[in-house]
Image: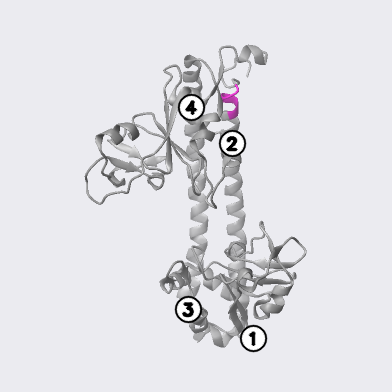
Amino acid sequence: MNRKQLLEGWKVKRLGEIASINYGYTAKASSENIGPKLLRITDIQNDKVDWSSVPYCPVDEADFQKYKLIDQDIVFARTGATTGKSYLVSNPPESVAASYLIRLRIKDSTISPQFISKFFQTSGYWKSVSSGISGSAQGGFNASKLSELVVKIPPIDEQKRIMAILDEAFEGIDQAISNTEKNLANARALFDSFLNKIFTEKGDGWEEASLENLSERITKGSSPKWQGINYVDEPGILFVTSENVGENQMLFDKKKYVEEYFNEKDSKSILVYGDVLTNIVGASIGRTAIYDREEIANINQAVCLIRCQSNKLLNKYLCYLLNSPYFRQILHDNEVNNARANLSLGFFRGLQIPLPLVNEQASIVFKIDKFFIETQRLETIYRQKLAALNELKQSILQKAFTGQLTSKNC
């Protein structure tokens, strides 16, 4: 069957032609159980909504009729980290969509909302969202851009056949994804449990000492802006921020460079190979890694540099220690939360470290390294499986929206 025959009866439509598309209602949630529910971006978790936890909001009848949600509406996050995420509403209580959502309501009875909702899972849709994001640092995808998106739509009977095939295929794939995600989480939890056991069940002869007495230097960097220094393209000084400090590994998918003059202004925080770096500001507080590059670099004010006295404290021992759930909790318990959570250098200098002799630290590190390598191997396998399963879903969706899924010759 050639492509022309395959697409016979299909139509190409803009979303604005087949649906009404509107922004949500601007209102604040109420603590009182008065009015309709106010569906927000944060209420949509794992493609589900727990309506019992959705707050109410006061709204007059005219606005309720204008903004209310009905069965088979589709809502979209239009800003922030979840921009483009969609949700097909099913038998909602009396409710309205919040202002940071876009509501799409199919108005053509020959088009299935379920079919259109599957379009919003395709890679093509997500590419459109990415290219259409604009505005603030949080990004955004507006109703006009959504209206202009083009969808290929078959006759209603074929839509139903496609949906039946997708539902059956996705049921098995989604179950496999769920199982793989659980295996990934279990591998991580097992490693965390191993770390906790080591650092909470201390061995004979262990002592405690302040980190200040075990380190050559504990400091942090500063902001280039405060120093009147510019970011530059490579070459320059590699500038390490909290996003580069992963858990037990440095992350350099994204690199920043600053003018070389920065090292003259802030020489105390110039990095050397083997320095322990831990994040002290924001959501990633306590995430710790060892700087493992020979490249000259410096850090910003969100990263703490700890240079161990190697005859007393091994950098890998400290890195694993700070990344253990037990010590991460100690760090979080001592956060100072003004505008953003942060930890002070004074806190780190006074932090008490459980300390065996250096040769025992080396033995502990050797054991953890072996466990860590095996954990990473398992995590790599599980992530590869997740990627393959998601690619399979995209392949099936691609066929669905190009007419190949129900072709007799496929």
Question: Which residue does the numbered mark 2 point to in the structure image?
Answer: 128
Q: Does the magenta stretch include residue 400?
A: yes
Q: Which of marks 2 and 4 is in front?
A: 2
Can residue 69 be seen here? The reply is no
Spatial separation of the CA atoms under disc 1 and disc 2: 56 Å
Q: Nearer the viewer, mark 1 or mark 4?
A: 4
Count the numbered circles shown: 4
Closer to the chain start, of discs 1 and 4, is 4
Spatial separation of the CA atoms under disc 3 and disc 2: 54 Å
Residue type, numbered disc 1: Asn
> Pointers 1 and 4 in contact (CB under 8 A)?
no
Residue segment shown in magenta: 398-402
Question: Which residue does the numbered mark 1 point to in the structure image?
Answer: 311
Which residue is found at the position 63% from the left and 15% from the top?
Answer: 409
Q: Nearer the viewer, mark 1 or mark 2?
A: 2
Name the residue nearer the viewer: 57 or 364.
57
Spatial separation of the CA atoms under disc 2 and disc 4: 15 Å
